[in-house]
Image: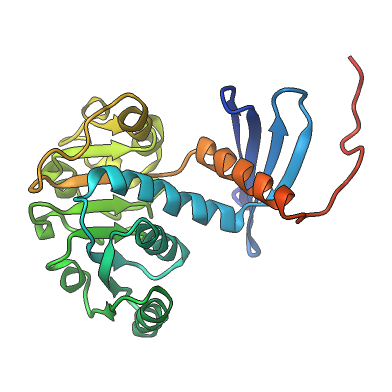
Amino acid sequence: AGKGWLRVGPVVMEQSGWMGFKAMNLAAGIGVRYQVHLYAIEDGDLKAIMDAQYLTTLRTGATSAVATRRLAREIPGRVAVLGSGVESRAQLEAMHAIGLVESATVYSPTRENRERFAAEYTDSLGVEVRAMQSAEEAVAGCDMVVAGVKSNETVLHGSWLRPGMHVNSVGTARRDQREIDPVTFQRADIIVVDTRDGVFGEAGDALAAKDVISPDQVHELSEILANGGPGRSADDQITLFKSVGTGVQDIGLAAMVYQKAKARGLGTEFPDFPFIKRH
C-alpha cells in the first residue's frame, strides 16, 4: 500500500557449507530493519540470527576493498571520499586496512559533517584527511575515488577523472538515484560490478548509461577473482567498480562473524530452536 516494503535475499553456497538469507523491511515513519539467518547446509541447523545493519555496511566496504586491490594501482595514494555517511566511512576504513590510503579528502554538502569526518579519520587512521568545499575539489589530484552518496543527482562527473584513477561507486541501489554520470562509465577502461543483473537492474546511474555501456562489456567481480579475468594492466587505465550488494556478500560475512563469535564465546544460545518437524 505504499507504506513500506519487505525484501528477502536467499543464498546457498554449497562449497562453503553455508546457506541463509537477509531480510530487510521498511516501516514508514520508523525506519529500516535488517537481519540475517545463517544455516549449516550439512544438517540444516540454524546457527545464528544476527542484526545485519552494521554487517551490511561492513560487507560493502570489504567487497570494494577486494575490488580495489585488483583494480587500483598497487601503491598508497590519495583517496577522495564523496559522502560522509556509514557507507563512505566503511569504504575508507577498508581501503586503509589493505594499505592503499596515504591521505584523503572528503566532501559532503553539510560543512559540519565533512569537517567531523576529516577530524575523526585523521585521528583514528593516522593519515591526513582534509575537508573540501566541493566534490570536484576533493577529486582533483586523487588516485582513488569513493562515491557513497544516495542522491538523485550526479555527484561524480567523469570529466573530472584523469588517467590512472580508480573509482568505487556504492551509493546508488535504486532506479531513481544518480551518483556517477554516463561519462564515468564511458571513460573507464575496465568496469567491474558485483552482479550484472543487480547493477543494470537496480542502479539508476547504470541504467542512465545504457547508451554508452552494456552489461556484456563489464566483468563480474567473481570472474576477475576466480577465473583470472582482467584486472589493471597499465598505470594510466581508469578503472571502475560499481556495486549494489549481493546476498552472497551478506551470508559469507555472516558465516565469518559467527565463527569468530563462537571462538570467543560471544552471543546467546537458544537450544532446540527452531522446532524440527521430522521428515
Q: Residue at x 12, y 52 (%)?
A: 164
Residue 2 seen in this snapshot = yes
Residue 22 locus on image (x, y percent): 62, 41
Residue 245 locus on image (x, y percent): 45, 43
Q: Residue at x 40, y 80 (%)?
A: 113
Residue 39 lies, with reference to residue 140, above or below; the image says: above
Residue 56 locus on image (x, y percent): 54, 52
Residue 70 locus on image (x, y percent): 27, 42
**Left or right: residue 176 compared with residue 3:** left
Q: Quadrant of residue 7?
A: top right
Viewer-proximal residue among 17 and 31: 17
Q: Quadrant of the C terminus?
A: top right
Q: Residue at x 38, y 85 (%)?
A: 112
Viewer-proximal residue among 44 and 23: 44
Residue 52 lies, with reference to residue 219, above or below; the image says: below
Residue 6 seen in this snapshot = no
Viewer-proximal residue among 188 and 198: 188
